[in-house]
Image (spheres, helix red, strand yellow):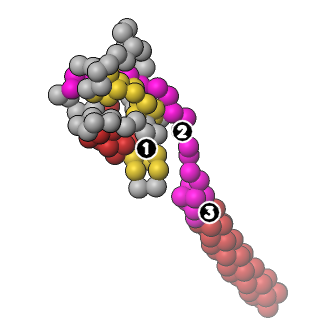
Amino acid sequence: MNKVVKRIIGTMSIGVMTLGISMGANAQSIKNEKEVKADKEVKASKETKLVLANQTWYFTGSSSDNPTTPSLYTTTPHSDGCPTPLQRICTIEAPDNGSGQPDMSAPVLPGKTVADQINDAKDSLNTSSPQTNETVSSFRKN
């Protein structure tokens, strides 16, 4: 009887050890699966480029204000349109930054942001032929 009890205890001990090892391996497998899934999600988010739709923004500042300041834009058109002479930015095309303002850091062309293009257009106001671009669609008087 003593030998039978020892044999049962020995068999149970081996079973418990096997179960413990199996559970540990399963937990590690689940952990690795989660890490792989998380890694795939991170890679997917890095590879996915979200393209936001542009909308028309109207500059409300004066010629002495910085036209790359998002809070100086509204989606409400000017009451007088964009009359000449051309002295400052009137309208731009840019995506919303999520706060109801234009996103000045949004890419427009490789190496050019909305702010870069606004500055380019603003600089052209000092020349004999002011130039609009992909972002700045019109100028207006002061």
User: Mark 1 = which residue?
Assistant: 106
Tell me which amino acid carries mark 1: Ala
Vertical placement of residue 79 versus 85, above or below = above
- The quadrant of the image that shows the C terminus is top left
Query: In the image, residue 87 lies at what x, y percent?
Result: 26, 26
Q: Which residues are magenta?
A: 39-63
Helix, strand or loop at mark 2: loop
Magenta residue check for 44: yes
Specify few, some or many for label 1: CA neighbours under 10 Å numbering under 14, 14-19, or 20 or more. some
Please, which residue is most extreme toward the bottom here?
A: 3
Disc number for residue 40? 3
Q: Is residue 107 left or right of residue 28?
A: left
Between 6 and 33, which is closer to the camera in this rendering? 33
Q: Nearer the observer, disc 2 or disc 3? A: 2
Location of residue 81 (image quadrant): top left
Helix, strand or loop at mark 1: loop
User: Mark 2 = which residue?
Assistant: 52
Magenta residue check for 4: no
- The quadrant of the image that shows the N terminus is bottom right
